[in-house]
Amino acid sequence: MTSTTEQTQRGGINVARLLMSFGPLMFLALLIVVFTVLKPSFIDPINIFNIMRQISITGLIALGMTFVILTAGIDLSVGSLLAFCGMVAAVVAKGGTANTLSLSTSGTQGFGWFAALLAAVVVGAMAGGVQGFAITRLKVPPFVVTLGGLTVFRGLTLTISNGGPISGFDASMRWFGTGLIGPVPVPAIIFAAAAILCHIVLRYTRYGRAVYAVGGNAEAARLSGLRVDRILISVYVIVGFFAGLAAFVLSARLNSSEAVAGIGYELTVISAVVIGGTSLFGGIGSVGGTVVGAALIGVLQNGLQFNNVSSYTQSIVIGLILILAVAFDRWLKSRVRR
Amino acid sequence: MTSTTEQTQRGGINVARLLMSFGPLMFLALLIVVFTVLKPSFIDPINIFNIMRQISITGLIALGMTFVILTAGIDLSVGSLLAFCGMVAAVVAKGGTANTLSLSTSGTQGFGWFAALLAAVVVGAMAGGVQGFAITRLKVPPFVVTLGGLTVFRGLTLTISNGGPISGFDASMRWFGTGLIGPVPVPAIIFAAAAILCHIVLRYTRYGRAVYAVGGNAEAARLSGLRVDRILISVYVIVGFFAGLAAFVLSARLNSSEAVAGIGYELTVISAVVIGGTSLFGGIGSVGGTVVGAALIGVLQNGLQFNNVSSYTQSIVIGLILILAVAFDRWLKSRVRR
Amino acid sequence: MSPAEAAAPSPSPALLAVEGVTKRFAGVTALSDVSLEVRPGEILGLLGENGAGKSTLLKILSGVMPPSSGRIVFDGVEFNPHNPQDAKRLGIVTIYQELSLIPTLTVAENIFIGRAPLGPLGLVSWRKMEEDSRAIIARVGLDLDPTTPVSALSVAEQQLVEIARALSLKSRLIIMDEPTSALTETEVQKLMSIMGRLRKDGVAIMFVTHRLEEASAICDRMTVLRDGRLAGHLDRDGGPIKLPKIIEKMVGRAASELYARPTLRDVAGDVRLSVRGLRTVRDPQAPHAIVLEGVDLDLKAGEILGVAGLVGSGRTELARAIFGADRIAAGTITLDGKTIAPETPADAIALGIGLVPEDRKHQAIFAALGILTNFSIAALGRYSNAAGFMAERREREALASYRKTLSIRMASPEQPIEGLSGGNQQKVILARWLARDPKVLIVDEPTRGVDVGAKAEVHQILVQLAARGIAIMMISSELPEVLAVSDRIVTMRRGRITGEMPGIEATEEKLMELMALDQTQEATQ
Amino acid sequence: QDKLTILGSVPSLGFPFFVHMLNQIKAEAQAQGVNLTESDGQNSAPKQTADIEAALVQKVDAIVISPLDVNALAPAIEQAVQAGIPVVTIDRRVDGVEGILAHVGADNVKGGEAEAQAMVAAFPNGAKIFHLQGQPGAGPAIDRNKGVHNVLDPLKDKYQIVFEQTANFARAEALSVTEAGLAANGKPDAIICANDDMALGAVEACAARNFTDVKIYGFDALPEALVAVRDGKLAGTVEQFPGEQSRTAVQIAVAYAKDKTEPKEKLVLLTPIVIGKDNLDKAERLGETK
Ligand SMILES: Nc1ncnc2c1ncn2[C@@H]1O[C@H](COP(=O)(O)OP(=O)(O)OP(=O)(O)O)[C@@H](O)[C@H]1O
Ligand SMILES: Nc1ncnc2c1ncn2[C@@H]1O[C@H](COP(=O)(O)OP(=O)(O)OP(=O)(O)O)[C@@H](O)[C@H]1O
Ligand SMILES: [Mg+2]
Ligand SMILES: [Mg+2]
């Protein structure tokens, strides 16, 4: 008797939840329909895979940012860190800063893709760790620390590369940016795999629970025996790791690491997370939402470009639609609650 | 007997408070000393007035941003709104979009500086009001609304000006950017007057205290009978007003309104506020802090430039010092309370 | 079910009439067809178990939320408040169950929120505000610097500030939702006498409490809710309304003895926790918090130690210090003979110490998170496998069993805990620590906001835990509760232990004497 | 103390083009035996203005500047001129300020025209064109766009711009934008880009679709682009001789500061040329491409 009630109740709430999470998703579907009607080739596999490849870079970082924002933190340094990790990866891949411009694809230069990947993610994670340390130990708010990081990492990147790019990687490295597995671009697969992993971590592990708890109420989390500082540091390590991974994929995709890479990414990435329903005040949100948020932005940009809308009008339309998408989500939620 | 205790207690707290607020201020003083030792001409009145003029633009916006952040909000659109208001002011000052590049200083064209100023602040305030409305009525988080605003206002600016600048204002308008009253630059005086006004409003009016209350706990403020929505809308109107004022001063100073003006200002402005001790979670902060924060950033940039530090190194040093300044403040606070 | 109006000799017309009010939330009907009346100069008690709908009704009356259906008449006019301000304008003043002060502002500002006194030039006069607020809080017996930020106050102090604020407003109807849940006898007495005075002035009061003695002592009439429905009205019949009558109306069956006196149990257990010369430093974040000035204490396995004291006596501070939540300046703590020095709550928990904090809202619940997460957060290790994955089935089963034993009223394990009534939230937090199965469990105001029935259950559970050998330290401001379950009782005052006696010998009078010596004498030091 | 000090200011050291420019200024200053104060405008007119103001306080002896914006920097430069400090502008000319010592530049409008003309020459029978523009509102973006349209607008019938989008001077954005353009419009004959970074991004997008015969044009003649031209990946890139501009400007400024030598010409205009595979040797930075 009781168990049936529980089950129906649980079922009811799940349907409601699903509907709620449909806010951005429904909007995304709507956009796809509209763009397809405007120009049917929009839905061609080539273009869909283009979009997937395009959102994979900021999407990867957005996965890490989801962890950070769930703890009520923020990381503004991701764009600069991306550039920094990309430059590190390039230096490792090319075996030094000499010979920065050769576009040769011979397989023998430098230390190879694996070392480059490792360097990028380790440097990214370490940089994140240092920032996390400043946040927890020096008690400087995440906004300030990572704003500092934003300028520091950019300066370091420019110093390493003296302003210029480092280009020309071997084919094995480039595969991570331009390769296909079946018809699917490798970056899209990396992003999908990372998203599933993050979803599992946040939803089904002890650590994930702790992240939500710290964001929900840090003091209560501390009094419940969670090592709040360690968890906070860890989320910055995670976002740094993903910035490194994204940097590697981006460099592989562009065949070049640029000192100006990733400028302004922090806002794109944070928007993806927030449009996906994660609260900037912590404790509420999901990886699924972030993926939808990233897709929404990607589809919007691509669709407008696809229709050759003038860049001025694009700005206006993108801004309005982002607001509308979230407003629609709120409206839907308030309906479901009733 | 009791009254003496009270007084010493209150006195004690006031001294403590003063010392606490000294965190960024002490750091600012330290920086000035260091730069002066490095190069005594740093402290020349000319240079000091330069710095004051330089911080006045972002400083003005930061005053408005202080209101917003005190309510636990944020406004990312200020840079774009600055460009938009500047363009509006230029169109009004020139009496249309024709003749956009004449550098003539004849006093007869267009509608004059007063109309231009009025247009800039009214448009700014209205744009802020619209955003505030979306935040309170559509229940879209400030981050999303103003991120949308960031791209929308930029697109509008580019549309008005068709990408180019509008230049050449008459002398009466230019005075607001380049004029002097005694030895003091007009923009610095405008900034100082605005700061004093904001300080009085926040500290000594019921409205100001309501702003703090809403930021401290919006739900409790509502339960206490405050009109939370109206207060929230008002702070976006205020920051919009200041973006308009800053736009007017900037256009007058550069003798030109550019479509690319203000890119990235949101971060500079928010840093000034946050470094000044205002909490991004609302309810805590002051105008004095914001002024010190803006000055800190201005002195740092000017001082490094003054000492011919290379641009890349400047980035690194500025980032580190911003973090250090806040860390120092936190450390000082934890000391003083003991 | 006709309201017995005979009790009042000349019934004045109702100031407030609630007619058939219903309130539905998603899936839950919190109120269904409730009607009641309040007359000027009358104190109406509103009683009911946790989740009965009391707070919901009061929130509707004060304009926080609209009813789904039904009518409210205030002063003869239909009343449809859209927001708290509408209610306030008519002279309806509310003290909410969940504290609603603004933590970042000072005491003075909270008292004068939205109506700060203005000086010349129309600017806020801080001096006048501070002076006036000092007088206002003094009325409820609170003596603290009005420039203190509210975030530095204890729950009890916050509650007093709220009461003081409400009393300082011009009002015709005062709504009090569990104003006394964190207060001790002394403050309650002060409040009662103020309420009595207000009654004489013709102010109507609606009063919610789970401390039935209190209700019985002060209320002229009572309205009892059960499961969101009206269970009936009770009237003063010459003398105070008797407790069994109230309980019967509340739970729908005859009441058994609630506070059973402890029998002298054989607590021959070894000393489990021992504290010697414990001192704490003044916390920079909470300048107001009491400093422990050398506490010595022993806690035996299988024993329930009651800790009694007035507001601000240092009980909470003692608990937090043992738990590693606050820094210790001097002194030693030994657990099972080994000296321990927990630097964080995590350390203390790992050693087998648990703490149910007093400030539920800020220190215990994760408001937006589901009940399941709220329940298991302190025992994640127990409900996860070696690889770090949650064992959700086990977790759910455990919650389900606590749901039954503690009779937690909830819709589903995923429901955000903020949707629960206050008392039910408290039960989830208790379940959190029961699931952890600690060696030493410190409970700070464990039944704050818990209804009588559940309170008895909580006491039962504490006794059972003790019987299993767990050492329990119970801090409570409700002396009957302390007397009911404690094997031994210590009293505290100004950071020191002032007395100790076996529970069976203790009486309220004896405890009061040890707890409350003249505080003002020492205040100046 | 007797050593002269000059200010060298460029719009943004985030872009390799200006890094090169400043490096050349630095090298020439060293060769002339003067001190150099460096300034990075960080893509912000107020920042570059502030740098000039700081230099005025320090009483530099001359200013060599590539202004971020020809209008917005005018007041600051005017202030310098009024303070009696010789100013030489590079690359972009500031209008309406009297008394500038000299201007050494290559007009971006002319560069855009050259770029489009090179494309026209490659496709005498007409072509389907993509156009990637620079950051909206930025001076060079406006001028280069104008140049391209000056040439192509009269030839609308033969040379259709089927896809015209901004990619903000950035490589990653150019890659995405080009991908979208290719998906929507199929293969173009040529892609005209407002800088080399975008051109290199377009190269990657075309390569991914195996459209290796699309002729892609860049702008700035960065070493990386020269390599791509050599390898046949880029059809051409516009050379504006930033190094020569910079060195000439420093020479003029130092000569005047030392002994008031007036420059032979007040206006030195270098004609931008398009570097293709056959005239790679004309490229200023060929030496850096080893
Ligand atoms: N915002 C809400 N959303 C959903 N359900 C709610 C909400 N607020 C209250 N409820 C539900 O309404 C019912 C009545 O709650 P209410 O808070 O009125 O109880 P109460 O009588 O005040 O209990 P307590 O004595 O524990 O404070 C409960 O079942 C509760 O779960
Ligand atoms: N480090 C701290 N941080 C935050 N709050 C603290 C801290 N230390 C103590 N407090 C709070 O200060 C209050 C005063 O503590 P104290 O031990 O004096 O109270 P008490 O005797 O338990 O009486 P009551 O809780 O009824 O006021 C406590 O409620 C506690 O929550
Ligand atoms: Mg309640
Ligand atoms: Mg306590």
Image: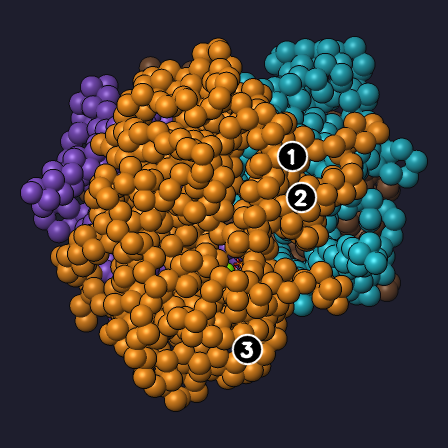
Chain colours: A purple, B cyan, C orange, D brown
Find out if the beta carbon at label 3 lies less than 8 Å from the nearest ligand 2 atom: no
Residue C139's tag is 2
Tag 1, which chain?
C
The image quadrant where one finds the N terminus of chain C is top left
Instruction: Please give the name of the residue rendered at 46% of the width and 59% of the height, measured from the top-left corner.
Output: C479
Of the numbered discs 3 and 2, the one sitting upstream in the chain is 2
Tag 3, which chain?
C
SS for dot 3:
strand
Q: Is residue C519 visible?
A: yes
Q: Give the residue pinned by disc 3.
A: C295
Instruction: Please give the name of the residue rendered at 45% of the width and 12% of the height, measured from the top-left corner.
Output: C78
- Give the amino acid at mark 3: Val
Specify whether C105 is left or right of D289. right
- Give the amino acid at mark 1: Ser
Q: Which dot, 3 or 2, sits closer to the camera?
A: 2
- Give the amino acid at mark 2: Arg
Mark 3 nearby-residue class (10 Å; few <14, some 14–19, many ≥20): some
Tag 2, which chain?
C
Q: Are marks 3 and 2 in contact (CB under 8 Å)?
A: no
Q: Which one is in front, C188 or A257?
A: C188
Q: Are marks 2 and 1 in contact (CB under 8 Å)?
A: yes
Mark 1 nearby-residue class (10 Å; few <14, some 14–19, many ≥20): some
What percent of the width, then of the height, locates residue C484? 37, 62
SS for dot 1:
helix
* Disc 2 and disc 1 on one polypeptide chain: yes
Q: Give the residue pinned by disc 1.
A: C168
Q: Which one is in front, A164 or C57?
A: C57
Vertical position of residue B312 compared to residue D128: above or below: below
* The furthest residue to the front: C238
Instruction: Please give the name of the residue rendered at 9% of the width and 46% of the height, measured from the top-left corner.
Output: A3
